[in-house]
Amino acid sequence: MNRRTISKEKFIENVELHPMRQQEDTDIAIVGGGICGLATALALHRKGINALVFEKSETTRAVGSAITIFTNGWRALDQLGVASKLRSTAIPITGLHELSLDDGSSQKIPLRSEELRCLKRSVLIETLVQELPASISYFGCQVVTIKSDPLTAFPILHFRDGNSIKAKFVIGCDGANSVVSKFLGLKPAQYLSSCSILGFTNYPHGHGLESESIRMRRGSISVGRIPVDDKVVYWFVGRKWTPQDISKDPEMIRESALESTGNFPEEVVEMIRKCDIGSLILTRLKYHAPWDILFGRFTTGTVTVAGDAMHLWAPFLGQGASAAIEDAIVLARCLAQHLTRNKVQAPLQTYVKQRRMRLVKLSTQTYLTGMLLEPSSVIVHYLCLMLLMVFFHDMLGHTRYNCGPL
């Protein structure tokens, strides 16, 4: 089991073995060292609560694409004390632009009071890591099962290498294929018929683009583009998933993106052609249905989940990372409030109660938006459109949410 440090090149490396004793106890174990796990660890650290983070990968997962952070996410990052540093790495986005290449229709939404920036995932991960004590993160630690101690009823984590650890609380931040979610009996995420190709393109002399997030559509294919800073642009291609979309070869992923966008403007094709080949990711979209989030049993005893393990949805609203950071703030706040009163199960129940309806609303808006893009009958398409207009007529209402103080 490895402890992490950060090299001068700002990459996360394993340089020192950090063995874990058999059956070593801890107050709080966080399963998963991604954005949600690290944000939860940092929120607890800010409240003076110790936790250990167990990540199955051999290194911190600092690779990946970009993350859009709206006002609600920046409020949560402010509570973690990292927002100012992160703001310096990304330019503010001043508007949203929807463009149909089929009929030429266009809709622009200025962002006046809302804050939107596009962060590199690696920058967010590294910033969170730098704020945490080096001794709390363990790598190469894959949790395979969770069982309850017959004497104390506290959960015991069993690792692939044969080690185990007992914790008073277990927080599952282990993503879409969560072991903790399975322990809780939650339903697995479902697949959409769509996939996304994500990447960065670097313009050494500046891209000269407007500071707007633009999404272009032609037929069933969409292309999104948003500047990260003056030289780097994040982009995605959304299209129908096919069985051939299992290759992880970046050259093949780029060719696939170029084939999908051959009849898009030349600047789009050139952006994909000149992309950072190492940044490319192809992923099939998955989601938790709104009713699964409404009725899901997100806590049993002293075990709970957060982030994608709790609420996975497609990226149509750009709220995945922000909602996970909100989870971290609310969870740490609830633990801090109740642990001082010696209550064990109350903090997790309070956390789930405070988060549930926020997550139901986000998942419903995302689900209805996604259904408009899925193959469906005219009646289903019309119904989804009507529901969006009635319940989510304020398209950016979800970005003004405030999860409250840490």
Image (cartoon, grey):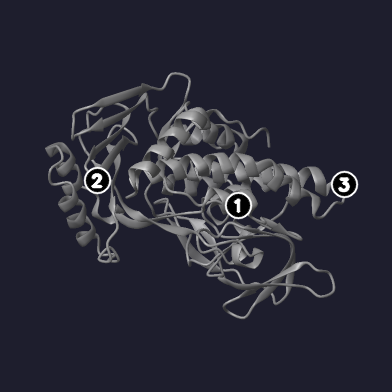
Distance of label 2 from label 3 (alpha carbons): 54 Å
Residue hosting label 3: 341
Q: What amino acid is at disc 1?
A: Ala
Q: Which of marks 2 and 3 is in front?
A: 2
Name the residue located 33 percent from the left edge and 34 percent from the top edge: 229
Residue 63 spot, x, y in % from top left = 39, 55
Name the residue located 47 percent from the left edge and 49 percent from the top edge: 313
Say which element carries label 1: loop
Q: Nearest the camera: 82 or 74? A: 74
Distance of label 2 from label 1 (alpha carbons): 32 Å
> Can you say whether 145 is above or below 345 in the image?
below
- 10 Å crowding of disc 1: few (<14), some (14-19), many (20+): many
Name the residue located 85 percent from the left edge and 51 percent from the top edge: 343
Residue 31 spot, x, y in % from top left = 60, 61
Residue hosting label 1: 306
Residue hosting label 2: 221
Q: Nearest the camera: 276 or 316? A: 316
